């Protein structure tokens, strides 16, 4: 009887602690992004990867490729407006070394351009928690491409 009780407790704990791997964040994030776009009256483009972007100012300078070194001023926040990262002075990086949403999205701007990237989890940090970013999160970035280096 003790063994049956112990096995039952172990089974309940195991199943209660297991992660729900069945969440389809691609579909969920797309719905969340579309709702955000509608609620904020944005005119966004959607790429074939699922990235949404808004170009407020296209810019007139050089246009980066996915392997360019760039300097970007940005503010990153969640759908609820909570800011998780920002750099108004400019962050310099190679576009091969950032999340996929940036690697793709920054290439839609020219130097001096600005806009918004709405990045689903599969182009950001995925379904697992990453520091202060919960798994499955949509990431929104206000970006300004300061320079292509």
Image (spheres, helix red, strand yellow):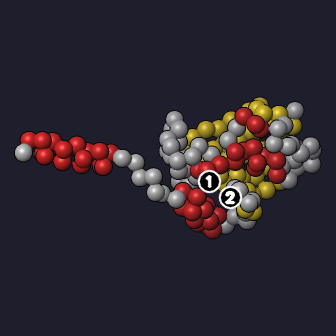
**Screen quadrant of the N terminus:** top left
Mark number for residue 90?
none
130 in relation to 37, above or below: above
Q: Is residue 82 left or right of residue 58?
A: left
**Which residue carries the number 2 mark?**
50
Point 12% across, 41% down: residue: 3
Which sits in the foreground, 92 or 29?
A: 29
Q: How many marks?
A: 2
Q: Tell me, yes or no, if residue 112 can be seen here.
A: no
- How many neighbours does mark 2 have within 10 angstroms: few (below 14), some (14-19), or many (20 or more)? many
- The location of residue 37, given as percent across then percent down, is 64, 64
Q: Residue at x 76, y 48 (%)?
A: 104
Q: From the top left corner, tell me how far across and down residue 22 is, in percent.
A: 46, 57
Q: Nearer the viewer, residue 25 or 21?
A: 21
Q: Disc 1 versus disc 2: distance between alpha carbons?
A: 7 Å
Residue depicted at 75% across the width and 43% down the height: 103
Q: Are marks 1 and 2 in contact (CB under 8 Å)?
A: yes
Placement of 39 over or under 62, stated as above or below: below
Instruction: Using the image as rendered, state which of residue 22 and residue 123 is in the foreground.
Output: 22
| Residue 72 seen from this side | yes
The quarter of the rendered structure image containing the C terminus is top right
SS at mark 1 in the image: loop
For the residue carrying disc 1, how many other residues have a C-alpha within 10 Å: few (<14), some (14-19), or many (20+)? many
Report the residue that reaches farthest toward the left. Answer: 1
118 lies left or right of 23: right
Residue at image position (66%, 54%) is 118
Upstream in the sequence, badge 1 or badge 2? 2
Look at the numbered disc 2 and give the secondary structure of its residue.
loop
Left or right, residue 64 beside residue 100: right
Image disc number at residue 120: 1
Task: Return the x and y of residue 18 as percentages of the image width and height.
Answer: 36, 47
């Amino acid at each position: 009887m003790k063994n049956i009780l112990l096995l039952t407790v172990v089974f309940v704990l195991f199943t209660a602690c297991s992660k729900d791997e069945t969440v389809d964040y691609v579909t969920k994030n797309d719905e969340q992004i579309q709702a955000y776009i509608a609620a904020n009256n944005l005119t966004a483009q959607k790429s074939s990867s699922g990235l949404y972007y808004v170009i407020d100012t296209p810019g007139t300078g050089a246009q980066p490729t996915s392997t360019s070194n760039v300097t970007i001023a940005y503010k990153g926040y969640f759908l609820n407006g909570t800011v998780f990262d920002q750099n108004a002075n400019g962050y310099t990086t190679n576009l091969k070394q950032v999340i996929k949403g940036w690697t793709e999205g920054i290439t839609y701007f020219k130097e001096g351009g600005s806009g918004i990237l709405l990045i689903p989890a599969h182009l950001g940090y995925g379904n697992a928690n990453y520091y202060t970013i919960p798994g499955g999160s949509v990431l929104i970035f206000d970006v300004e491409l300061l320079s292509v280096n």
